[in-house]
Image (cartoon, rainbow, N blue to C red):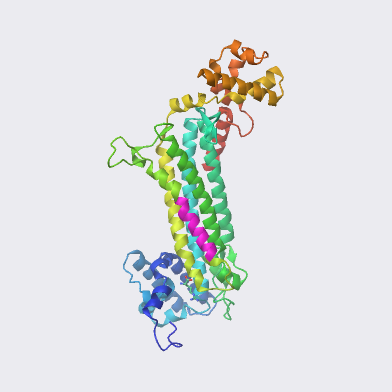
Amino acid sequence: MWGGRFAAGPDAIMEAINASIGFDRRLAAQDIAGSRAHAAMLAATGILSDSDAAALREALLTVLSEIEGGRFEFSTALEDIHMNVEARLKELVGEPAGRLHTARSRNDQVATDFRLWVRARIDEALDGVAALQRALLAQAEAGADWVMPGFTHLQTAQPVTWGHHMLAYVEMFARDAGRLRDARVRLNECPLGAAALAGTSFPIDREMTARELGFDRPMANSLDAVSDRDFALEFLSAAAICAMHLSRLAEEIVIWSSAQFRFVTLSDRFSTGSSIMPQKKNPDAAELLRAKLGRILGATVALFTVMKGLPLAYSKDMQEDKEQVFDAADTLLLGLAAMAGMVRDMTANRPALEAAAAAGFSTATDLADWLVRAAGLPFRDAHHVTGSLVRLAEGKGCDLPDLSLEEMRAVHPAITAEVFDVLGVRNSVASRTSFGGTAPERVRAQIALWKERLG
Ligand code: ARG
């Protein structure tokens, strides 16, 4: 492509380090869409003849079908997807192929391709997140009022409802979707026509190519257009936070599916067996999801490290952007699908949840609150009295409701038989009616809202 300037071809090692065709072939469809838009624009502005543009646009479709059909021979000597496509165009249409690169450079070309690629993955990730939210919502609806222990420090804290716990993840994934949508808005400007870095002397129409490719507008500064990879970093950052959420849910599923908890049973479709222990049913998908953030966060750090300190405008360093993003996108999409499947299929074990909800003095806060409300104690004193009652029950090896009224009154005389009403887990969750609280009525209202939002 630059034979005019060079007397000798590259060393094999040079070719090996320089070539990106091994991975950027994944940009083929975007590269061809960009070239087709560019050809149409060159014809509309009179830079290229209509017949050349028509021939190029047609031949580009041929190349696309060859690539999609696995009939395209990629060449490392041709370095990257852009030059592989152009070389094949030359074979197909001859001379006009050499006119396609008028008023553009591989710098704006690759920036455009990559934006289109990331945009498509964002749209898929949004679908993936919505599917997962629907699966969580179905779980929430099935067990809106099932009582389970809520934890802090992974120690029993207060009873909550299964529906409430599921909805917490619906909220988390909604924020992930919001971040992806925000990133998409900023991504959706078109670099094409920035050319190498300075723009071009040809009378191009950048609005037209931007529109053709579904962008909102052309990027305003040609230097920025070819050197910006913020859109990839934003996608990776949003993906990393989402993968962190997947990891947290995955960890809960690992804990919940253990013989010690038995809060959920995973379906056979989403578990694995052991080659030596016949009784085992392992939550491998959840464990892998717990780990996958490592890859996505690794990709994020890698791309930040590539971009850090790069002067304007394009530097070849930026070719190192793609593999990280490709792997992170693949990982995120697979992870979302796996989690949606696992959640959809899993069965919550209501008796185990409810039995655990009552253990661990989970209604101690209700007792303290009652002492404040019914007996007028300052909360700090109520806290102390309740602590003494917990210690008493612990010593006797029983739960709070198993203490007799006399035993309780010996600790504080203001306690009456009414206290037993607040010691049950069902009453406890029903009383948490504050906005955002765990009461079944609140949970049901949130479920209704989410059903409307997710359609
Ligand atoms: N394969 C290159 C990349 O991915 C395309 C741009 C090459 N530009 C250049 N000036 N050498 O970054």
In percent of width and height, residue 300 lies at 51, 58
- Rendering quarter of residue 268: top left
Residue under the image location 67 percent in, 23 percent down: 382
384 and 114: which is toward the camera? 384
Judge left or right: residue 270 versus residue 164. Answer: left
Q: Is residue 348 above or below residue 169?
A: above
> Is residue 50 something that shows in the picture?
yes
Q: Which residues are magenta?
A: 292-305
45 and 118: which is toward the camera? 118
Quarter of the image with the N terminus is bottom left
Q: Is residue 436 above or below residue 118?
A: above
313 magenta-colored? no
371 and 253: which is toward the camera? 371
In percent of width and height, residue 403 lies at 55, 15
In percent of width and height, residue 392 lies at 57, 19
> Is residue 124 something that shows in the picture?
no
* Residue at the outermost front position: 395
Marks counted in the figure total: 0
Residue under the image location 59 percent in, 31 percent down: 442
Judge left or right: residue 312 versus residue 125. Answer: right
* Residue at the outermost top position: 406
Q: Main secondary structure of the magenta part?
A: helix
453 and 304: which is toward the camera? 304
Residue under the image location 50 percent in, 62 percent down: 302
In percent of width and height, residue 69 lies at 33, 64
Residue under the image location 37 percent in, 70 percent down: 63
